[in-house]
Image (cartoon, rainbow, N blue to C red):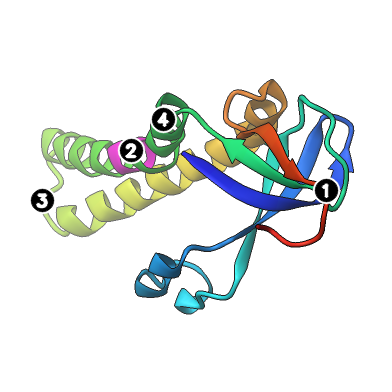
Amino acid sequence: MQKAGVVISVEKDIAKVEIQKHSSCSNCSACKLGDENSSVVAEVYNEIGVKVGQTVYIDMESKQVLSAALIMYVIPLFSLLAGIIGASIVLNAIGITGNTDVYSAIVGFFMMTASFVIIRFKDKKLKSSGKYLPMITEVVNDGEGPY
């Protein structure tokens, strides 16, 4: 996954890069309601020492993208399902029969929320490892503007 963007700030080995969204984002509406003229700011690993205002290419390996997606989407989903199924089994085993679906759903949502909280607390550690940060691979130009 390679994108071009403009460096807007640099702190030690982390740079913030403003990336213009692609026109196909107008069909998505996942962020900023599909405004195709908007941009996204990404924190990237600055191994090559870029400066503010430079246009750069950033890249992240597909394996890392899939791994990050697994952490953010699959783990909470499994936590939700484990909570629902586990609570249902436990409630039936101890003889509670009324409203087991409601109690199971509450436990499932609690476990999903707990997984998001744990991921959030681990976020700083994961960022500091640099494993899940995109990397600046190339300086395109030293001028203003993303392209």
Q: CA distance from mark 1 to mark 4?
A: 28 Å
Question: What amino acid does circle 3 point to?
Answer: Thr
Q: Which amino acid, mark 2?
A: Val
Circle 4 crowding by C-alpha within 10 Å: few under 14, some 14–19, many from 20: few
Name the residue: 38% across, 34% down.
70
Q: Main secondary structure of the magenta part?
A: helix
Q: Which residues are magenta?
A: 74-78
Q: Tell me the SS state at disc 1.
A: loop
N-terminal-most mark, 3 or 1: 3
Residue type at tag 4: Ser
Residue contact between numbered discs 4 and 3, judged by CB atoms under 8 Å: no
Residue at 61% x, 39% y: name it: 58
Residue 11 located left or right of residue 96: right
In magenta segment, residue 75: yes
Please state which of residues 88 and 9 is positioned toward the viewer in this rendering: 9
Q: First in sequence: mark 3 or mark 2? A: 2
Vertically, is 57 above or below 146? above
Residue at which label 2 appears: 74
Cα–Cα span, label 3 and label 1:
68 Å
Closer to the camera: disc 2 or disc 4? 4
At numbered mark 3, what does the secondary structure look like: helix, strand or loop? loop
Q: Earlier in the sequence, mark 1 or mark 2?
A: 2
Q: Position of residue 50 (x, y in %)?
A: 83, 36
For marks 1 and 4, give the one nearer the viewer: 1
Which residue has dot 3 on it?
Answer: 97
